[in-house]
Image (cartoon, grey):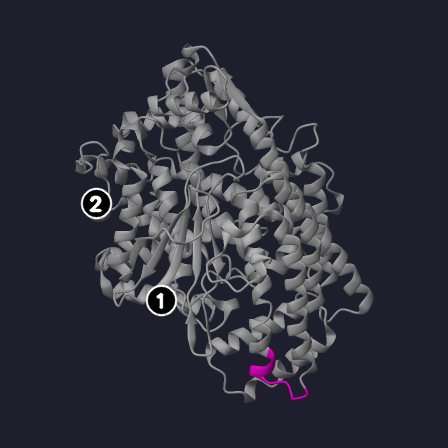
């Protein structure tokens, strides 16, 4: 019996092996097609219930199986799973096209849509109907037969190429390691970093210390290693992922992806991929994104240039470095920060034991939203590292199932993300609760120390947990509007707003306790964390804007004449560049957000959401960071509503007005 085809509530990980996926997905596609046929062949006139709602609830089994599969492919992959991903990606893309290009189905959807004025629908129902109709129109339902075939071909290629892109980045990340056998080469590195590197070497039965491109190994090395040549070696290795003359080179894939995206947009009647994407975002047009980005750039650039010049002067004075390079930035920034604020990341780490930070974020969620988290051991997991929780409200009713997976492994991609195994929706009067997961890559415990987080890792945990709250507190009728199913430049608001609690004394005193003594983090540290929060914010802003502008450069212009990935990148970075270019490095070939994840023509949304989050948090500050009334408003109008209405309407209902960038500029010290 295939466990994936049985009825299950939580994912039956322990019963699944990779051979189950292909037959299960084949069968689930067949089941979903039958559900679509029933809608199309319904003899009754098309109605909101028998067409719009029926379509939204169709393919539930397929959705659940494929979410399990693709989540595993990101967090616990293997050669076998990667091979299966390549085989099933075209099936899923073809199935999606079978629905979107089904003329009879579209006819029914269009009939309901054309009659929408007479249907007395709630705002949520109107949104569902509009989203559905646009989904068809934006995926080729109005095309002629020949163009529909062309679209199918493009979509199949796109899904294959982005999978291949991601596999190449992972392979390049895993292929590099720096083995050091001379203790002098470790000068500057904190003991915890050296211990983790020694442990890794021992695991691989090698002598000395091993450093990799996984973030918990790579970032401390670049921040603390005194040996400039070794920092350079690490930085160049990280920067040339997908840009080397080997089988994992991503240059052709990048050019192919952007050309296909452009062709797809043109086929659907849009000027560019960015025009296509942004039509359904808060930003609406590429012009608005450029204007927003350039406006922030004008405010941040003078500050960034001054910060860079000061850092250059500092490095010169300290070590006679006449030209700061990319592998110097983190190192001298950390030293300068320590000097200016007397604040050292390593001093802070003992106060951020992973378990305490998790308890802290749970306590904050309880104080704000009355949630209770209980670790349970009867839920299946895909790896022993994963923790599982039952989340309830004050009446002990289930709110969500929560999975958390915190440490790096070979089969796990870098970075941090939130995802879900089951959406929230209401069907037959039953409110089905969501199963939500966060995946991170934090420093592992060693033989002598628990997992101690850097302050950056603490904010990352809060960020992903903010996304998780958006998923957990969802309370909508329809799957496709639930939780984080919102425009992508709105999706970062819940995650980014929660990061603000990490800087507040009232919140830190709940969980920042020394792992050995239990002593609360000294308040002068908290003051320094707060004061240093806007340290080098000009350079940080410039960096974020540079990624967003690179993304827009790839996706808002016709790419058919681009022959060099590196040349395009250099022209995109012209206005934001501070450090000299490194010839053998390229960002685009490992820019997974836009070439593997869903952020193409959407990377600007991180900065966009910062404007929202600074404005929203200002409201909390005015009333108190644990003010129940403001928290209730945020829960009611933002977290629970998903994508049921236009984001700006929801935001104004929470805040009473539209957001202004002033709060962000003030917080960043750029005003």
Residue 646, above or below 234: below
Quadrant of image for the N terminus? bottom right
Position of residue 29 relative to residue 15, above or below, is below
356 vs 580, left or right, is: left
Q: Position of residue 61 (x, y in %)?
A: 57, 64
Q: Is residue 575 left or right of residue 430?
A: right
Q: Which residue is mark 1?
A: 657
| Image quarter of residue 307 | top left
Q: Nearer the viewer, residue 221 or 625?
A: 221
In the rendered structure, which disc, 2 or 1, sits on the residue that comes first in sequence? 2
Per the rendering, the mark at residue 505 is 2
Q: Nearer the viewer, residue 249 or 610?
A: 249
**Mark 2 Cα within 10 Å, few/some/many (few <14, many 20+)?**
some
**Could you tell me residue 658's position as x and y percent?**
39, 64
- For disc 1, the neighbor class at 10 Å (few under 14, some 14 to 19, many from 20) is few
Residue reaching furthest to the front: 1
Q: Nearer the viewer, mark 2 or mark 1?
A: 2
Q: Position of residue 430 (x, y in %)?
A: 42, 75
Q: Is any atom of residue 110 visible in this view?
A: yes
Q: Residue farthest to the right?
A: 146
> Which of the 4 image quadrants contains residue 108?
bottom right
The residue tagged with tag 2: helix, strand or loop? Answer: helix
Where 75 falls versus 124 (above or below)?
A: above
The residue drawn where x is 52% and y is 65% is 7
Bounds of the magenta span? 43-51
Magenta-span inclusion, residue 47 = yes
Question: Does the image show residue 611?
Answer: no
Query: Residue 589 at x, y = what percent?
Result: 63, 37
Q: Secondary structure at mark 1?
A: loop
């Amino acid at each position: 019996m295939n466990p994936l085809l049985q009825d299950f509530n939580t994912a039956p990980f322990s019963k699944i092996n990779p051979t189950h996926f292909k037959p299960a997905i084949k069968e689930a596609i067949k089941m979903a097609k039958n559900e679509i046929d029933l809608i199309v062949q319904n003899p009754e006139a098309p109605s909101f219930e028998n067409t719009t709602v029926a379509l939204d609830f169709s393919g539930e089994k397929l959705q659940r199986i494929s979410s399990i599969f693709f989540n595993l492919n990101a967090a616990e992959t293997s050669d076998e799973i990667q091979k299966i991903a390549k085989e099933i990606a075209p099936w899923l893309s073809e199935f999606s096209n079978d629905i979107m290009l089904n003329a009879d189905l579209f006819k029914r959807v269009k009939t309901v849509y054309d009659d929408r004025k007479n249907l007395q629908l709630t705002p949520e129902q109107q949104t569902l109907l509009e989203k559905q109709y646009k989904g068809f129109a934006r995926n080729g339902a109005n095309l002629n037969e020949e163009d529909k075939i062309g679209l199918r071909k493009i979509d199949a290629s796109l899904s294959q190429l982005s999978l291949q892109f991601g596999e190449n980045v992972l392979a390049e990340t895993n292929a590099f390691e720096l083995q050091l056998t001379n203790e002098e080469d470790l000068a500057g590195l904190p003991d915890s970093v050296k211990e983790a590197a020694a442990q890794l070497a021992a695991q691989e039965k090698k002598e000395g210390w091993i450093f990799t491109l996984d973030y918990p190994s790579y970032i401390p090395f670049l921040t603390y290693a005194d040996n400039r040549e070794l920092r350079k070696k690490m930085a160049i290795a990280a920067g040339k992922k997908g840009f080397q003359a080997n089988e994992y080179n991503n240059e052709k894939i990048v050019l192919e992806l952007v050309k296909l995206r452009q062709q797809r947009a043109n086929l659907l009647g849009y000027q560019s991929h960015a025009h296509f994407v942004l039509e359904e975002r808060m930003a609406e047009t590429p012009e608005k994104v450029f204007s927003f980005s350039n406006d922030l750039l004008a405010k941040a650039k003078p500050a960034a240039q001054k910060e860079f010049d000061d850092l250059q002067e500092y490095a010169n004075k300290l070590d006679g470095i006449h030209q700061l390079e990319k592998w110097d930035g983190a190192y001298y920034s950390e030293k300068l920060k320590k000097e200016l604020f007397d604040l050292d990341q390593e001093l802070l780490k003992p106060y951020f034991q992973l378990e305490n930070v998790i308890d802290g974020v749970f306590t904050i969620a309880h104080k704000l939203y009355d949630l209770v988290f209980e670790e349970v051991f009867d839920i299946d997991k895909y790896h022993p590292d994963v923790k599982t929780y039952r989340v309830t409200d004050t009446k002990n009713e289930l709110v969500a199932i929560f999975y958390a997976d915190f440490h790096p492994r070979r089969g796990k991609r870098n970075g941090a993300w939130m995802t879900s195994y089951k959406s929230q929706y209401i069907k037959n009067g039953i409110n089905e609760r969501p199963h939500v997961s966060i995946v991170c890559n934090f420093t592992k415990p060693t033989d002598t120390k628990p997992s101690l987080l850097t302050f950056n890792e603490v904010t990352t945990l809060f960020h992903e947990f903010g996304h998780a709250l958006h998923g957990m507190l969802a309370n909508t009728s329809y799957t496709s509007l639930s939780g984080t199913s919102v425009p992508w430049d709105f999706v970062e608001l819940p995650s980014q707003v929660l990061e603000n609690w990490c800087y507040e004394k009232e919140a830190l005193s709940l969980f920042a306790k020394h792992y050995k003594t239990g002593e609360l983090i000294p308040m002068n540290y908290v003051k320094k964390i707060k004061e240093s929060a806007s340290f080098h914010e000009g350079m940080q802003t410039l960096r974020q804007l540079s990624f967003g502008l690179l993304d827009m450069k790839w996706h808002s212009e016709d790419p058919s004449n681009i022959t060099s990935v590196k040349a395009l990148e250099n022209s995109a970075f012209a206005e934001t560049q501070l450090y000299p270019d490194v010839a053998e490095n390229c960002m685009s070939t490992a820019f997974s957000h836009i070439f593997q994840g869903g952020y193409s023509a959407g990377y600007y949304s991180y900065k966009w959401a910062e404007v929202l989050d600074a404005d929203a948090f200002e409201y909390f500050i005015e009333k108190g960071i644990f003010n129940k009334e403001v928290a209730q408003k945020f829960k009611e109008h933002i977290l629970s509503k998903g994508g049921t209405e236009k984001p700006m309407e929801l935001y104004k209902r929470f805040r009473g007005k539209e957001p202004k960038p002033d709060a962000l500029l003030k917080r960043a010290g750029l005003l």
